[in-house]
Image (spheres, helix red, strand yellow):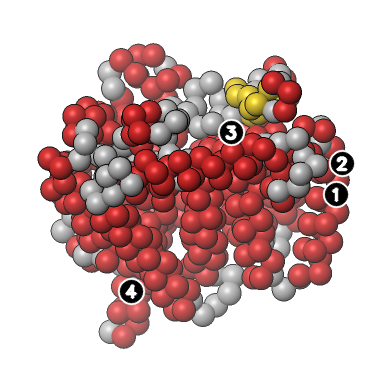
Amino acid sequence: MKVIQAPESKFFFNLYLLFIVSYLLRFTARVSVLGAIRFDLLIAGVLFIGLLKEAQKAKDNFDHPITKSLYAILIYVALTLPFVEWPGSVLKGNLILFIKALMFFFFTIAFVNSPAKLRKILVVYVLCQTFRVLEPLYMNITQGYWGSATHVAGGEFASRLSGSPYDVVNPNGLAFVICIAWAYWHYFVGNSEKFRNKLLYWGIASAFAYAMILTMSRSGLIALAVLGAFIFLASNRKFLIIIILVSGSIFAFSQMTDIQKERVLSITGSQESSQSSSAQGRINFMFRMADVWLNRPIVGHGLGTSKEAGANYGEDAKIAHSIYFEVLIELGIIGFYFFMRFVLHVKNAIISVKSQVMEKGEFDHLLAQVLHSLLWVYSIFSIGYFGFSRSWWYFLAGIVVVQAGMMKKAEEGKEK
């Protein structure tokens, strides 16, 4: 893919890379002085100025259907603010959290305007997500760190691996990060013909698999199975993959503790598992979330207020453990329509890009494979996990818009 780059300073792009590293690795939590000066906010402020300067150059990206669908959500949130139940909670902090997540979309479509920058931002993003997995895993191996625990039968608790003490992700969130990083590693490194790259990939994959077991995340295992299905369908070595998956699964299961085995078995609803009740409890929780939504079904309780709504109208003072119920509770059925419209535009754009990619093994083809598989991983995983005001959906959507725009420009260049 060859695209003529517009002459511009690399300053804003490099600053955006710093923002990604600082945001994902929580520099402000690790270095107190950075937290005191609101380091991320300062960078975001400068980047917003750059956004205004670069918007005209990236006009096609800002006119993309995905971008317009996000405009619609923002306008909807603003217009319905007087009609939601807790507008004060929205303005106090929830709106800021949502805008921070959206920054990953708008900064991406504004500052990533060449294939070289696209590759660089993906490398930085994936390395950050990989570090978020390896850091707590290393701490677990060397220091016995877990970070979280879950209730099991008999009033006992079992330790679960979550993000590092500086991170904000719980065990399910860490499992989500593992799936995100694993997808990129597999398609871009695991598919390489170089032996050293394959060796590196299998080392990383082994660490990811072990960390996934320690999280005891059932949603994570299901999402990983979805990713595995895409890898299997796209591979020309299906028999080899079957052998690796079967042997790897048998080995992993044999190394699990009894509690970890029961956690896995509870996915199937097996009554023999002592943790089958917790799986049923998650299903019951979803029914309770539906009841909470029906208290204000049209415009919702307000952006970011699913925990507040659960405390007042349900039995659980928890964030809705499903992005779909999260959106229904917070934005109502109308907001849910706008969110699903956004997801549909992302899907259509990915399918369009895949249809244009002719040569397998090229960067565009591999990236399209990653984005398509991750879209389904996100969609399935989000059934049991929140994330409307988190960055991963919007970074993915931004990369989709950027790739589609570059391919469009490349085609126009060929025609000329």
Residue 254 in view of the camera: yes
**Whether residue 261 is situated above or below residue 230 in the rendered picture:** above
> Residue 408 shows which numbered tag?
4
Question: Mark 4 or 1, which is nearer the eye?
Answer: 1
Front one among 202 and 262:
262
Q: Are marks 2 and 1 in contact (CB under 8 Å)?
A: yes
Q: Quadrant of residue 356?
A: bottom left
Residue 350 at x, y = what percent? 43, 68
User: Does dot 1 land on a helix, a strand or a loop?
Assistant: helix
Which residue type does callout 2 highlight?
A: Ser
Which residue type does callout 3 highlight?
A: Pro
Residue 384 at x, y = what percent? 52, 46
Query: Alpha-carbon neighbours of circle 1 within 10 Å: few (<14), some, or many (≥20)?
Result: few
**Quadrant in which the N terminus is drawn:** bottom left
**Whether residue 246 is situated above or below residue 102 in the rendered picture:** below
Residue position for label 3: 171
Q: Are marks 3 and 1 in contact (CB under 8 Å)?
A: no
Which residue type does callout 4 highlight?
A: Lys
Residue 177 in view of the camera: no
Which residue type does callout 1 highlight?
A: Ile
> Residue 254 shows which numbered tag?
2
Q: Residue at x 15, y 42 (%)?
A: 83
Q: Residue at x 26, y 65 (%)?
A: 64
Task: Point out the residue furthest to the bottom here.
Answer: 415
Front one among 239 and 12:
239
Query: Alpha-carbon neighbours of circle 4 within 10 Å: few (<14), some, or many (≥20)?
Result: some
Mark 3 or mark 1: which comes first in sequence?
A: 3
User: Does dot 3 land on a helix, a strand or a loop?
Assistant: helix
Residue position for label 1: 250
Mark 2 or mark 3: which comes first in sequence?
A: 3
Question: Mark 4 or 2, which is nearer the eye?
Answer: 2
Give the number of marks: 4
